[in-house]
Amino acid sequence: PAPRTLLLTGAAGGLGTLMRGLLPAYGYELRLFDMTPIEGEPGAITADLADRDALREAVRGVDAIVHLAGISLEASFEKILRANIEGTYNLYEAARAEGVRRVVFASSNHAVGFTPRPREDTPVGTAGLIPVDTPHRPDTYYGLSKCFGEDLAQLYWDQHGIETVSVRIGSCFMEPTTVRMLSVRLSPGDGARLFHAALTAQDVGHTVVYGSSANTRLWWDLSTARALGFEPQDDSEQFAEKLVAEQGELDPANRDHAYLGGQFVTNPPRWPH
Ligand code: NAI
Ligand code: 15L
């Protein structure tokens, strides 16, 4: 049967807040988890991913988990280790112990961020798009933690039969703010469509997908996402005129523009906490 009750970790964050708004329309009942309290949500669980007892209780009885919690930018290795690497391990161990069978893991384009981006002269819709089986090329410790999360998901599928869809999300925010986002943006509506597909598709084992809308300037292959039943409805090209007028086209000579990970390869934004 299709999952109905979900644990949403990272529910206080940007993407978590968007998904709290959008996922209930698909019929899901959400249990919220974050170390940051969520105003107006007295039922939310306020706990750290380091708290294994809290995690056991949080996952108990849910049909599936959407795992968004963690450090979402670059930070010291020690911080990333605790929140993203150990934290994701703790979550999967809780899922295993409580018999939860499906996880949607918020991976990131930064797991492969040092992959050179396709160039304008690569015709769209061809083998020039980056495939999901391109080698891991993390651009940061943050990206490295997402590589770990994908491998952990594979292990828990092979070893314990827990299914995961690892979504290498591009950029999911209300509004696109950079020319790079014309290629990598996942609109919030398409994000919810993709998570719903990842929660309901049959026999996913461990499947890796890219998470973006059907962007005209797409850099990667969405076929594994589409194979889950995801049909993106949006294209960031509608923002192109404004963003290109403000910022110009991407410059191949600029190192910030040369890789999938954008600025993360040179000067990654840092986790403020
Ligand atoms: P965010 O930084 O707004 O939210 C992350 C949330 O996780 C925060 O509410 C924070 O309190 C919580 N958190 C952090 N460490 C925790 C811990 N140890 N225990 C419990 N909660 C903890 O990030 P955003 O943008 O909402 O991203 C959500 C997830 O999606 C992250 O895993 C991020 O890496 C991933 N992602 C997001 C993208 C985006 O465009 N928004 C792109 C690619 C990946
Ligand atoms: C990510 O993985 C980050 O969590 C998010 O804040 C954005 O920076 C996004 O990637 C991106 O690549 O734009």
Image (tube, grey):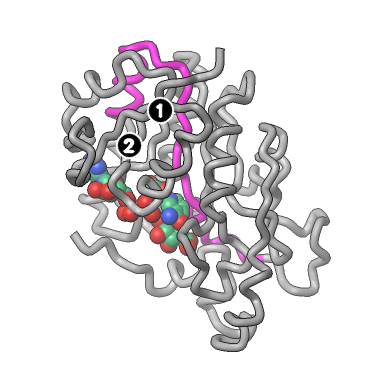
* Residue 54 position (above or below residue 117): above
Residue 82 in view (yes/no):
no
Residue lying at 57% horizontally and 71% vertically, measured from the top left: 180
Look at the picture and state if 57 lies above or below 79.
above
Q: Quadrant of ligand 2?
A: bottom left
The residue type indicated by label 2 comes to: Thr
Start and end of the magenta stretch? 90-117
Question: Neighbour class for label 2 at 10 Å: few (<14), some, many (≥20)?
Answer: many
Q: Residue at x 22, y 19 (%)?
A: 57
Does the beta carbon at disc 2 come under 8 Å from ligand 1?
Answer: yes
**The image quarter in which residue 270 lies:** bottom left
235 shown above or below 232: below
| Residue 36 shown in magenta | no
Residue 91 among those drawn in magenta: yes
- The residue carrying mark 2 is 9
Q: Nearer the viewer, residue 151 or 3?
A: 3
- Horizontal and vertical percent position of residue 31: 31, 28
Label annotation for residue 65: 1
Q: Is residue 142 left or right of residue 150?
A: left
Residue 231, percent from left and from top = 70, 42
Q: Are marks 2 and 1 in contact (CB under 8 Å)?
A: yes
Q: Is residue 126 left or right of residue 194?
A: right
Please name the amino acid that badge 1 sits on. Answer: Ile
Q: Is residue 24 at least partly visible in the picture?
A: yes
Quadrant in which the C terminus appears: bottom left
Q: Earlier in the sequence, mark 2 or mark 1?
A: 2
The numbered mark at residue 46 is none
Q: Residues within 10 Å of mark 1 (few under 14, many from 20)?
A: many
| Picture quadrant of residue 200 | top right
